[in-house]
Amino acid sequence: PQDKLIFGGYSSGAHVAACLLQRPELLKERGLPLPSELCDGVLLLSGVLGTRLTCEPSAAPRGAPALTDTIGAIVFGTDAAAALPSPVHDIDASPALPHLLVCCEHEVFGLPVIEAAFGVYFASREFRERLSRRGVPATLVEVRSDHWFVLGSEVLAQALRQHLFGLAEASKVVHVD
């Protein structure tokens, strides 16, 4: 069997990879193949996939939208923050390639207030749901780790061994201990 080429990244690298795959015109301008010709699947590991509010304010964790919007406005400026590429919001431009999304049980230190505020940025669950609604195969694997220590963890190695080459499986959510 031919080896598969998996395209993706970790953290902000997952954001960049998803944004690039959602903008095939940028690839074409540079003489590169379209995402469907470039790779066989997408791996987004603990990705920053939302740069704007990812759910209706009534469904968001209490205080999260206001804090997230404030952080974005402070860091980027109000207009620039509203114009940032946000893979979860640009889901219709995502290639119909199988996606493996790996998220951490605790993306931001496990502190409830910080998790609620910054959880809007780590939108793997919502990204998977939106891909699945479009009929794109997407598997979400939640690992018992945090964002900062996941790369060297055995739980990540186990999750990748189990799921990386099964990207074409039906959409599902898996928890790995």
Image: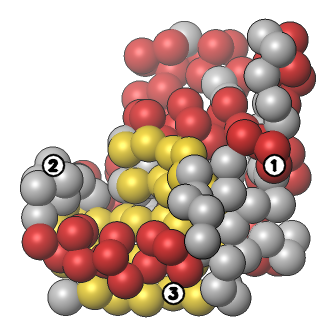
Return the residue at label 2.
148
Please give the name of the residue rendered at 22% of the width and 69% of the height, measured from the top-left corner.
Answer: 157
Ranked by sequence position, the earlier of labels 2 and 3 is 2
Give the percent coordinates (x, y) of residue 45: 40, 55
User: Disc 1 marks which amino acid?
Assistant: Ser
5 on left or right of 20: left
Please give the name of the residue rendered at 59% of the width and 88% of the height, measured from the top-left corner.
Answer: 172
Mark 2 vs mark 1, CA separation in Å: 31 Å
Give the percent coordinates (x, y) of residue 138: 65, 74
Q: Secondary structure at mark 3?
A: strand
Task: Count all numbered tags in the image, as a single digit.
Answer: 3
Relative to 90, residue 19 above or below: above
Residue lying at the far front of the rendered structure: 1
Relative to 30, residue 28 above or below: below
Ranked by sequence position, the earlier of labels 1 and 3 is 1
Relative to 57, residue 38 above or below: above
Return the residue at label 1.
36
Ranked by sequence position, the earlier of labels 2 and 1 is 1
User: Can you tell which of label 1 and label 3 is closer to the viewer?
Assistant: 1
Please give the name of the residue rendered at 68% of the width and 67% of the height, measured from the top-left corner.
Answer: 98
User: Can you tell which of label 2 and label 1 is closer to the viewer?
Assistant: 1
Return the residue at label 3.
173
Dividing the picture into quadrants, the one containing residue 145 is bottom left
User: Disc 2 marks which amino acid?
Assistant: Trp
Give the percent coordinates (x, y) of residue 126: 61, 67
User: Disc 3 marks which amino acid?
Assistant: Val
Disc 2 crowd rating (10 Å Cα; few below 14, some 14-19, many 20+) is some
Question: What is the basis of the colouring in this image?
Answer: secondary structure
Q: Secondary structure at mark 2?
A: loop
Disc 1 crowd rating (10 Å Cα; few below 14, some 14-19, many 20+) is few
The quadrant of the image that shows the C terminus is bottom left
